[in-house]
Image: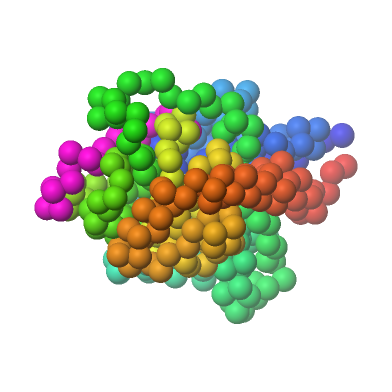
Amino acid sequence: MKKIKVLQLGSPGELYGAERWILALVKYLDINTIETWVASIRDEPELEASICHEAEKYGLHMKIFDAYGKFNFSAISQLKRFIVDQDIDIIHTHHYKTDIIGLLSTRGTKCKAVSTPHGWSKAMDFKLCCYELMDRCIFPFFDAVVPLSEDIYRPLTYIPGLKNKLELIINGVDVSEIDEASVSIEKLEELENENYYIIGYIGQIIYRKGLDILLKAVAKINTIDWRLILIGEGEQRDELELLASSLNISDRVMFLGFRADRLSLLKKFDCFVLPSKLEGIPRCLMEALTAGIPVLASDIPGCRDLIEDKETGILFRQDRPDELSEKVAMLAHDTKLQEKLKRNGRNLIIEKFSAERMAVNYTKLYSSLVPVK
């Protein structure tokens, strides 16, 4: 039986939400039905294309295309040639840039095109808004568009010519990867006092994540001896470091940058906070819930898919540092609530949001687009 060849096209650079999503998916796809390739277009020579090297560790095929510049048209010709040479059946893309390049590369080939939108930015950057609008405009030309949450799915139903190509497959997380991560034994000088209450965040350090609200919130907490750990990189890091200094909390805030051992460090957290302005179904929350870490998140679509207030986590009104401050302090003093959230949060992920369940649904989708002979 001929396997369906699927090329997952991820972004270069470090591993964040969409790239970790790809790795969680491909790990559990039915290897008797699907042959997976993982690729990335490196648009700057210093980028590592980390997703490709991780895929190689899984024993998967990988390919890195070099096409330097923000939009280098040679990427399309390189990708098209690869699709034809390797007889790729489906290209699966995950971001406006990979969507555009991926779709154009399939023209004139038998290769099907699938896109998974992971969410949209609220940034006021005009160029980014134009790219994201263009992305939605080209969705009707894909063979399938598969949003990962109800909140991303619903607005797309209004795009002419798209509704019959839409399929909702809810986000999933690799439970085994989190369970297998040991608690980090690395000694962090700032955490020598084991009585600190550790508040944590893992993800991109960008405006959409609302991390300025988190800093302003923790600065108001005076009933517990807290430390804040921020893991990740992004355009807002310098600004947030200045904000921490202006709030006189620099000695209690740790910017650790991108960390390959993020899951091990996650298990050191006493709580995880996501103060985002906009989300799909956030992978970082799913990982924290799976690890049994109590979570606090903005009361916004996406977060509400995972968090029922005081049942699987705690919701707070976005852009309300006073409210977040009060709820972190309340959680720190309520051990019964902590245990309840740990138990319920993990059970929720295992029952409804596992990568295994997501992979079964994607195997069915791929097979419907390219019937196995």
Query: Which quarter of the figure has residue 28?
Result: top right
> Visible in this render: residue 87?
no
Residue at 36% x, 39% y is 198
- Image location (x, y in percent) of residue 113: 63, 54
Q: Residue at left 54%, top 62%?
A: 309
- How many callouts does the rendering have? 0
Q: How is the image coloured?
A: rainbow
User: In the figure, is residue 256 to the left or right of 53?
Assistant: left
From the viewer's perspective, is residue 142 above or below residue 344?
A: below
For residue 251: magenta?
yes
Q: Which residues are magenta?
A: 245-263
Q: Is residue 267 above or below residue 357?
A: above
> Where 230 falls versus 180 (above or below)?
below
Q: Position of residue 237 (x, y in %)?
A: 24, 47
For the residue pair 97 and 28, the one nearer the viewer reads as 28
Which residue sits at x=60%, y=79%? 158
Relative image position of residue 60 (x, y in whole percent): 62, 28
Residue 373 placed where, x, y %?
88, 42
**Magenta highlight on residue 272:** no
- Is 210 placed above or below 83 here? below
